[in-house]
């Protein structure tokens, strides 16, 4: 008979401000999907393990100063250097659950005052997520969670700016109904994310990979 089309994996992105619950939910989601028999890998940006990622890490820890434009391009380059690996995983049928991506890239740099269109341009043509699950949490609620660390950007005024820019970009993300996700309990949110992830994996199994912002 005819050959079965090869099923690709899905690119599932978790975005949101600091302490919205991305790491918690990504870990639980990956565990659950694996238990249900799906092939899945967990990734996060910035990927601090590469030479570019080492520079970003030093910048975030404030042991290194960099021009705002230069570090923006490093964050983008850090995604580009992962494209081959991500495409290989997806086309071999493994889904990826990714924490932060180009939306964090654009919002954090635009919150410093860089022009939005300029911020988007180096990320044009990256692999596009199949779904972006935006964990939204008012900054005053985030402030009640475990304290900010020592890293750059970890202050409430800056985060408030970033959240506003995320909300402005929502129309551009492939999201479902994300209202108040991050105000629910960890298990309630987990249940919704699992349902969205499985629906996405099924929906895009035979669809081609897409390019971001093209
Ligand atoms: P992020 O990766 O987005 O910065 P984390 O997953 O590290 O966020 O969560 C930040 C803190 O908030 C952690 O202490 C975590 O246990 C807690 N947390 C995560 N989700 C919820 C939730 N839905 N309700 C209450 N606390 C939460
Ligand atoms: P965490 O590792 O705690 O998520 O912090 N950032 C991230 C940018 O400014 N640009 C980007 O492109 C990305 C992916 C968000 C990483 C910090 O780096 C910011 C918080």
Image (cartoon, rainbow, N blue to C red):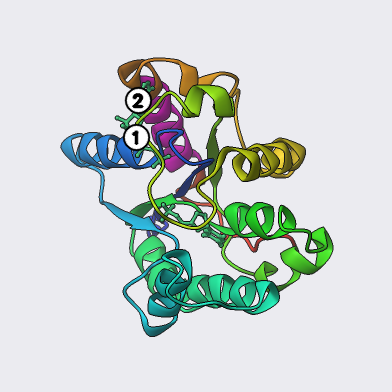
Q: Which residues are magenta?
A: 191-203
71 lies above or below 177:
below
Q: In the image shown, does 167 or 213 lie closer to the viewer?
A: 167
Q: Residue at x 60, y 23 (%)?
A: 177
209 lies above or below 125:
above
**Does the segment drawn in magenta span residue 210?**
no
Task: Tell me residue 147's x, y (percent).
Answer: 37, 36
Q: Residue at x 23, y 34 (%)?
A: 32
Q: Residue at x 33, y 64 (%)?
A: 92
- Residue 39 shows in the view: yes
Q: Earlier in the sequence, mark 2 or mark 1?
A: 1
66 left or right of 187 in image: right
Quadrant for the N terminus, please.
bottom left
Residue positioned most to the left: 35
In the image, which disc is placed on residue 121?
none
Secondary structure state at the residue bearing disc 2: helix
Magenta stretch, main secondary structure class: helix
Residue labelled with disc 2: 190
Q: In the image shown, does 103 or 88 lie closer to the viewer?
A: 103
Callout 2 crowding tier (Cα within 10 Å): few <14, some 14–19, many ≥20: some
**Does the segment drawn in magenta span residue 192?**
yes
185 left or right of 183 in image: left
Cβ of mark 1 under 8 A from ligand 1: yes
- Residue 1 shows in the view: no
Q: Mark 2 near mark 1, Cβ–Cβ under 8 Å?
A: yes
Secondary structure state at the residue bearing disc 1: helix
In the image, which disc is placed on residue 25?
1
């Amino acid at each position: 008979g005819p050959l079965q089309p090869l099923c690709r994996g899905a690119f599932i992105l978790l975005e949101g401000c600091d302490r919205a619950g991305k790491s918690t939910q990504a870990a639980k989601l990956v565990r659950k999907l694996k238990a249900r028999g799906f092939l899945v890998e967990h990734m996060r940006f910035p990927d601090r393990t590469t030479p570019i990622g080492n520079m970003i890490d030093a910048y975030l820890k404030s042991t290194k100063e960099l021009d705002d434009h230069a570090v923006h391009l490093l964050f983008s380059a850090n995604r580009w250097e992962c494209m081959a690996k991500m495409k290989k995983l997806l086309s071999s049928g493994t889904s990826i659950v990714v924490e932060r991506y180009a939306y964090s890239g654009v919002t954090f740099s635009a919150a410093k005052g860089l022009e939005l269109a300029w911020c988007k341009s180096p990320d044009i043509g990256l692999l596009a997520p199949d779904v972006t699950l935006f964990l939204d949490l008012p900054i005053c609620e985030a402030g009640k969670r475990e304290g900010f660390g020592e890293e750059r950007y970890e202050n409430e005024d800056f985060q408030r700016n970033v959240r506003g820019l995320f909300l402005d970009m929502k129309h551009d993300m492939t999201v479902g109904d994300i209202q108040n996700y991050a105000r629910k309990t960890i298990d309630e949110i987990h249940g919704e994310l699992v349902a969205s992830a499985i629906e996405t994996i099924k929906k895009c199994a035979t669809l081609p990979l897409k390019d971001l912002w093209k």
